[in-house]
Amino acid sequence: MVRLLIRMRAAMAAHRRSTRFGVASAIVLVAAGLLSAFSSLLVGVPAYPTAASGAAVVSAVVTVWVVGRVAYAAFSGGSTPRLELFRPLPIPRRTLARGLLVTGLFDPALVVMAIAFGALVALGAHGGVGPALVGALGAILTVLLSSVLVSVVEALMPPASQQRRAMGTIVVAVVISLVAVVGTLLPSVAAALIAGTVPALGLILGILPTGWAADAVRATTTGDLLGAVLPLAGSVLLLAALTLVWPAVLSRRLDGDLAATSRRRATRRRLLPGTPVGGVVSKELRMWARDPLRLTFLVIAAIIGLGVCIVPELSQGTGFLLPFAGILSVVIAGAGGCNLYGSDGLALRLTLMVPGAARADIRGRQGAFLLLVGPYALIATIVLTTLSAQGWAWPWVLALLPAIVGGATGLLPIASLVAVLPLDANGGPAPAWPVKVYAAMVLTLLTAAPTAAVLIAGAITGSTATQWAAVPVGVASGLLAAGLLGRAATIRLRRRGVAIVEQLSAA
Amino acid sequence: MNAPDAPAALELHGLRKTFGDKVAVDDVDLTIPRGSFFGLVGPNGAGKTTSLSMAVGLLRPDRGTATVLGHDVWRDPVAAKTVLGVLPDAESLPQRLTGAELLGYLGLLRGLDPAVVTARSAELLQVLDMQDAAGRLVADYSTGMRKKIALAVALLHGPDVLVLDEPFEAVDPVSASTIRSILHGFIRSGGTIVFSSHVMALVEQLCDHVAVLANGRVRSAGSLDEVRGGHTLDEAFADLVGTSVDRAELSWFAS
């Protein structure tokens, strides 16, 4: 049965990646995973001032990997194949439980994690063969623990609702963008652990089971035999306990005690006007919050926008970019909304069946975007410019912000109606989607060109008055872009709506 | 019942649509009288959905015209769509709105008064026995529930002509009987219904007019009795479409 389960799992994974975009993203994912794994391994290589500090740094790395894998299991919508598939089959539960546990070991993520946990062996190697062997044993135990924990967590989570599957996508996106931003901060965290300036962090890492292997390596290096055996024995016990609990968890899940839950959404009091445009705005606000693709982009926009500007301040003490964080977030968020009609799919039919709805649909989409990013960008800009204490930046941000917000609000619907890209068969973005996103970013920046020209002219001539004159230019250009491009989009939706539906239904 | 020169509820003239080499709909002419309960039947791939999509302005025909109560769906779409109620298919429903939100949003988009939208949505959800599902995402609905919420979408604005593609598919018997009584009430109030189905018994039970479509052409159209010609609709259909009713058997069940 185990072999059959593994073959099933492999076949499902193969089909998932059968689109070109799927293959490309799988390659990128594997490359990124391997790269991160080897960099994690290297964490164990350098000589640390004390055995304890080395163990703390390595256990931090191990913890991040295990928590990441388990969090993905919790939010990704469960195992492959779905456990419900086994419900009607006449297989004894214990046999099934054993089979699934073994199948769980054939998880590509575990290979990557095993490479990363090589840091434990590298760390031990400083103290000789003994500690290195303890490190290897600890690494194997931690991999096994992770695998069983993933199975248990997947079975404990209620069967996947649409929303939970969406959460998985968002968790991955958030983790990747956080890693990209925080990666630059890691040296400071490691430095803190080595210097022991944050004792609480070291203590927590030591208490968590993910830190036990590193602790055993530390103890072996210092010749503390009991200290080496205890954490390893603890890991074995925990593994045994999880393995014993597993059949019961699986049975509860398969016998339906853990029913599918889908959150009931309370009807909220209407805050927006009860007009066609108001209706579209409130629908769009909900779509931005519930469509994983859109929400992911908003979250990435906030993290990258802020991160790119804040990290240089934290690591280098350069506050030069701080005032522009809000503006950068708007550019990224706007580009994320460059294919709304493509990702909403055939729901466009509903809009087309409503006479005269084109204008309300466009203006409503613009209004929702403005409500989502406008206040955020304004507050971020004011707070961060004040914090940066760079007086010269005020006319720049106050002129560029309205120009960019207006430009993005104008481009959003028209870009969504040009070169509409339907989602692929798996509901993911089409292969050409990143190209469209980058093009939209460039176009959004271009909408601020007149304002930027005035600002640069002011900077060259050294005229503060000219620089401040860019503010009304920015406001006017923003209003014009939002208004005119929105009108163009309305006309296009009226003329081409049916053709777009045809294209979407052919996809 | 109708004024002698009043326009038909739905009138299709020479509608044609090709997809690549395949002719999906081949010069379809149909007149659907006002106040009729009109059934459109045909085998899979006969062109029912394509014809109905063109009739309501969701698919542009290669040639031909479609008018709703005298309004051309392509030249005067606003007037045509104001009087039309169309059952959206499941994939047209936004997956990430709740049933109640979907109705609220579409009602407002149609320019209905917010109070009217709230009252009608509540009544529709209650009549369709969906109060408990009102706060759940459409994505988490069963196929039958999606059909019901789609019907609510079609009825919300009080249309004169309802176009329903397979409205009873995957709907449980209790809900089906609720839907039947809603539709009968709609006809009694002077409305017209056009619906497509594979289920002959249902068409025979509900409809007073029928058209049989096969290979993109109208094989027969008229009142139910005219089309049946003294047989059951099933027999008439098999005769018109030319299907073989030989019993199919599976080799491993043969004795």
Image (spheres, coloured by chain):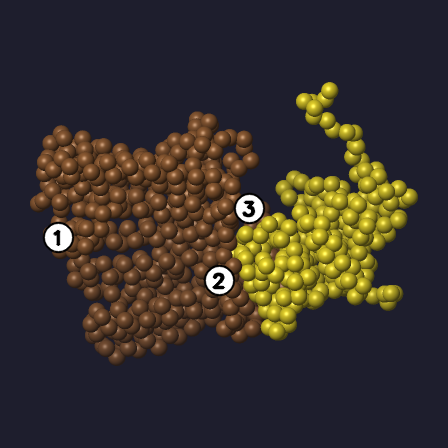
Residue A465 figure quarter = bottom left
User: Circle 1 sits on which residue?
Assistant: A196
Which residue in the rendered view is the most extreme toward the top?
Answer: B255
Residue plotted at (20% across, 65% down): A319
Q: What color does chain B have in the rendering?
A: yellow
How dense is the environment of label 1, judged by Cα within 10 Å: few (below 14), some, or many (20 and up)? some
* Location of residue A362 in the rendering, given as x and y in whole percent from the top left corner: 52, 65
User: Circle 2 sits on which residue?
Assistant: A286
What chain letter is assigned to the residue under label 2?
A
Which residue in the rendered view is the most extreme toward the right?
Answer: B230
User: Circle 3 sits on which residue?
Assistant: A507
* Location of residue A65 in the rendering, given as x and y in whole percent from the top left corner: 29, 44
What chain letter is assigned to the residue under label 3?
A
Q: Nearer the viewer, mark 1 or mark 3?
A: 1
Asked if marks 3 and 2 fall on the same chain, the answer is: yes
In the image: residue A61, left or right of residue B244: left
Q: Which mark is residue B104?
A: none
Relative height, residue A310 to residue A83 (above, below): below
